[in-house]
Image (cartoon, rainbow, N blue to C red):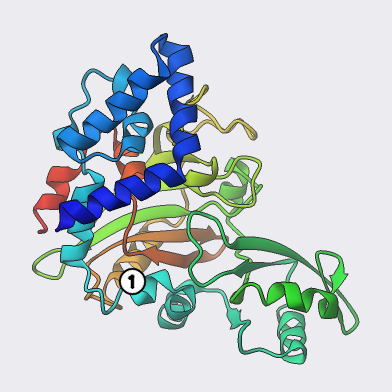
Amino acid sequence: MDKILYFGYVVLTSFKHRKKLLDFSRYYHTKYHKSVLFFLRESYSYYIKYSMHPLDYFYFDVYSNPSFDPQKYASTLFMYRYHKRLNDPKYTQYFFNKMLFHEKFRFLMGHDFINLSRVKETELRNWIISKDPDALMAKKMKSVGGFGVKKIYVGIQADQVYLNKRPLEKSFTYLRKFDMLEEFVVQHDLLNKLNPGCLNTVRVVTVLDNEQKAQLIGAVIRLGVNSDVDNFHSGGIAVNVNLETGKLEGNGFKLAPEDPNCFTEHPVTHVVFDGYQLPFWSKLLDTVQKACFVIPQVRTVGWDVAIRQNGISLIEGNHDWDKIIIEKALKRGIRKDLEKYL
């Protein structure tokens, strides 16, 4: 049954991302001087042989990597089964619904939020004035991949609130397209040095083992590039983080096959990645480990964490976290790492 569902998923997502598949194939055609059809055929042959999603063929640059062993990597079908086995579906709503997540994990967040579906204009004005922010983040409850998230700039003059330079009363209808407003998290100076353009978060993947002990699978920092969001699927750069030290390791990389794809430094700030120390690393890991036991019925989560000037803020948790960013960061497959928890 899983294979039938997965076949349907591949068909639907291939149609949805048909332009991306064609663009990747054309890029490979130009780079390697083989036909577009050749690369499309190869990407689907890996789906047939190894249950890899066709897009993963390009994301992992399989054609130019002779050492790539698909059986060591966690295929999309494997990850579907893995998440289904470890995460109780009765509790995953606390992760895909941002409002429920915020209410449940408020004590680890370090920043406030307000429900836009319940608030009146006067209440919202008073809340904004009490926070006196320079910016806020508007989010939809089920936003993913950096989509459904908008940075709102705030100005306050006397009792008048301006959002993106427009009075609140003229922005209120637009805001109601979102589900919540949350305080903009001001990141640590060392993160601003890396990239001041957006909030740059650390993704830490955890799993509760059979003895209910929190285990770490990997950690990656996502850095925006001329964008309001740091998301890997929205053109950002990711860099592996050493779990023991909190130092960046190796080069940064992007998801899509493009030139350049590998970065020794941030393309805007020119800060060198390898060896760069993230602050409050032990506090960050402590926050993540505490989060693991809030809803232990969801055993494996990809946590997104921000580092502030005076501590840590939990941003969100992903019960269906993407294996690609971790495997690309570690430069190896993690299938065996995960199988021992099944």
Local crowd size for mark 1, using a 10 Å CA cut-off: few (<14), some (14–19), many (≥20): many
Q: Position of residue 82 (x, y in %)?
A: 18, 57
Specify whether 324 is left or right of 273: left
The residue lying toward the viewer, choosing from 216 and 320, is: 320
Specify whether 236 is left or right of 119: left
The residue lying toward the viewer, choosing from 262 and 290, is: 262
Query: Is any atom of residue 262 visible in this view?
Result: yes
What residue is shown at x 64% (from left), y 52% (from top)? Answer: 228
Q: Position of residue 332 (x, y in %)?
A: 24, 34
**Type of amino acid under label 1:** Ala
What residue is shown at x 56% (from left), y 49% (from top)? Answer: 191
Query: Is any atom of residue 246 visible in this view?
Result: no
Establish if 269 lies above or below 81. Answer: above
Q: Position of residue 196 (x, y in %)?
A: 65, 47
What residue is shown at x 59% (from left), y 83% (from top)? Answer: 115
Q: Which residue is denoted by mark 1 in the rendering?
A: 291
Q: Secondary structure at mark 1?
A: helix
